[in-house]
Image: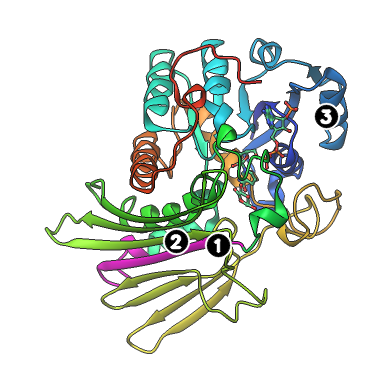
Amino acid sequence: MSKFILKWGILATGGIAETFARDLWPNPETRDVKDVEHKVVAAASSSSKSRAEDFLKEVRGVEGAKAYGSYKELANDPNVDIIYVATPHSHHYQNVRLCLEAGKNVLCEKAFTTNAKQLEELIKIAKEKKLFLMEAVWTRYFPLSIQVREWITSGKIGPVYRTFADLSMAMPPEDTFKDNHRMVNPALAGGALLDLGIYSLTWIFQTLYTTQKKPQAPSLLTAVRKYRTGIDEQTTMLLNFPREDGGEAHGIATTSFRVDGDPDGKASAGPSIRIQGAKGEIQVFHPAFRPTKTKLILKDGTVEEKDWDFPGPGKGSGWKNGFGGTFQEEGEGQGMYWEADECAYALRDGRKEGKYESLEESLVIMRTMDEVRKQGGVKFPDKIETTDYPVDLN
Ligand SMILES: NC(=O)C1=CN([C@@H]2O[C@H](COP(=O)(O)OP(=O)(O)OC[C@H]3O[C@@H](n4cnc5c(N)ncnc54)[C@H](OP(=O)(O)O)[C@@H]3O)[C@@H](O)[C@H]2O)C=CC1
Ligand SMILES: O=C1OC[C@@H](O)[C@H](O)[C@H]1O
């Protein structure tokens, strides 16, 4: 069988760009994917062409891969099928729009944009130009997430009435980040909500919204604790989803830079995610962005624990080593390849959006986050909230 080969261009050369591009290197057959392959054929750095050259060496770009010192040159490279956008949140709208205007398909890191207006505009352009566009919420494409959604839709835990979801990582900002770092800088759309809280919302949505036949947007109440830079350092969201049976389901989503979802690193604190139905519950353990353990508990006495693999070879010994580890011929991958595989299948089959998170759902989540910021009084500078284009942000 001939394989579909997807030729990637990587836009930006920071932490996640490196992790993602390294994850494209392992042979897809190591995860039982036999019909698609990935090649990194180009990369661009806004810092310099030599930074892009170094990056291509680090991530094992193909022989002859092109290095660019500007994002515009990458967007115009005719050999690139799809561009992975890996800049801070503040820059996504401008960078994705640059790629779409140049006729490129795009996979954009979370959070998609700073606000829903920007995302609406990008979706409109992608549709007009018949291009593929997807938010890189990698967690949605894990076999673990597919199984959890299947447990829900097959009625394993009965009707679902409530989901708790947390992603909190104790990293006191004043000791961890300078005020201009992307995690806390309003000019880079920093804050717990867009960086971590989006995963809590991912679990709320993929259990209470994606799994409904006719999903409806939730209403929302929020409590926000702000950091000295003006971004949110801790946010709690109460979401009320109308259900198709006429009832309601509640989502409680939390995120924090102050407390930890797994203080001892041994899951002693219990699950970070609890999906509760009439017949039992599904538990998912920290971290919500890359969980490796689930527990299914049913009222009939069934208790099933499962550890989930992240096949390699790939970046090395898994998330615990953080970003930018060294290549290993053996060991775990990171799991970003599953969302990359989805991009390959979509482009091969002519689909224009991701299978497990539609553009409409990304938009509803973006509107939810807009409302959280409104209720919490978190504002970003106009320059990064505008839909004007082009705007020079650097
Ligand atoms: N899926 C996941 O698990 C993760 C996703 N992310 C997401 O990826 C994105 C990037 O995060 P991360 O890689 O950690 O960030 P980094 O700061 O490590 O990298 C961001 C890169 O963007 C480019 N850039 C362009 N303009 C700016 C600017 N004004 N300030 C800073 N960087 C700039 C730079 O690359 P260059 O100089 O080459 O142009 C920089 O290296 C965010 O959207 C984040 O939410 C982050 C971590 C994990
Ligand atoms: O997406 C992410 O997941 C892992 C976190 O460490 C990181 O800050 C965030 O951007």
The structure residue drawn at horizontal position 54% and vertical position 52%, both measured from the top left corner, is 196
Residue 156 inside the magenta-drawn segment: yes
Circle 3 packing at 10 Å, graded few (<14), some (14-19), many (20+), is many
Q: Is 66 left, or right, of 287 in this rendering?
A: right
Residue 337 appears in which quarter of the rendering?
top right
Percent position (x, y) of residue 281? 37, 75
Residue reaching furthest front? 228
The structure residue drawn at horizontal position 19% and vertical position 61%, both measured from the top left corner, is 248
Can you tell which mark lies on residue 254? 2
The segment highlighted magenta reads 152-169
Residue reaching furthest left? 246
Pointer 2 or 1: first along the chain: 1
- Tell me if label 2 and label 1 are in contact, CB under 8 Å: yes
- Quadrant position of the C terminus in the picture: top right
Quote the CA–CA distance across marks 2 and 1.
7 Å
Can you tell which mark lies on residue 227? none
Answer whether residue 344 is visible to the viewer in this image: no
Q: Amino acid at mark 1?
A: Ser
Q: Nearer the viewer, residue 224 or 283?
A: 224
Circle 1 packing at 10 Å, graded few (<14), some (14-19), many (20+), is many
Quote the CA–CA distance across marks 3 and 1.
33 Å
| SS label for mark 2 | strand
Residue 80 inside the magenta-drawn segment: no
Q: Which residue is mark 3?
A: 56
Answer whether residue 260 is visible to the viewer in this image: yes
Can you tell which mark lies on residue 168? 1
